[in-house]
Amino acid sequence: MEILTIILIVILFFAFIFIYLMSVRMRQLENELREVKSRISITDEELTRLSKDIEDFKKINI
């Protein structure tokens, strides 16, 4: 019975370490996602300007 208790404590210890490492990795991924979103975000004004430029370009080519 004592050996079983020790084994279970060791398994719990490794499980807690694994949970901690996963939470650290999740925080890293969240920060990376925020960084990528900030780089690729396009405002409404930029989108309107881009569509206007495309329309102007179509008129010039025709």
Image: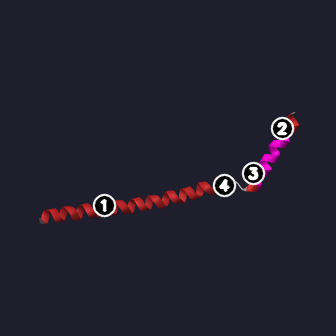
20 on left or right of 54: left
**What distance separates the C-alpha of mark 4 from that of mark 1?**
38 Å
**What distance separates the C-alpha of mark 2 from that of mark 1?**
61 Å
Question: Which of the two discs, 2 and 1, labels the residue nearer the N terminus?
Answer: 1
The residue identified by callout 4 is 41
Secondary structure under tag 4 reads loop
Quarter-of-image position of residue 1: bottom left
The amino acid sitting under disc 3 is Leu
Q: Which mark is residue 47?
A: 3
User: Residue 58 at x, y = what percent?
Assistant: 83, 38
Q: Residue at x 54, y 56 (%)?
A: 32
**Dominant SS in magenta:** helix
Question: Which of the two discs, 4 and 3, labels the residue nearer the N terminus?
Answer: 4
The residue identified by callout 1 is 15
Task: Report the magenta residues as a range.
Answer: 45-57
Q: Which residue is drawn at 40% across and 59% down?
A: 22
23 on left or right of 5: right
Instruction: Point out the image quarter for the C terminus.
Output: top right
The amino acid sitting under disc 2 is Lys
- Disc 2: CA contacts within 10 A as few (<14), some (14-19) or many (>=20): few
Say which of marks 2 and 1 sits in front. 2
User: Residue 47 at x, y = what percent?
Assistant: 75, 51
Say which of marks 1 and 3 sits in front. 3
User: Residue 44 at x, y = what percent?
Assistant: 74, 55
Q: Residue at x 50, y 56 (%)?
A: 29
The amino acid sitting under disc 4 is Ser
- Disc 1: CA contacts within 10 A as few (<14), some (14-19) or many (>=20): few
**What distance separates the C-alpha of mark 1 from that of mark 3?**
48 Å
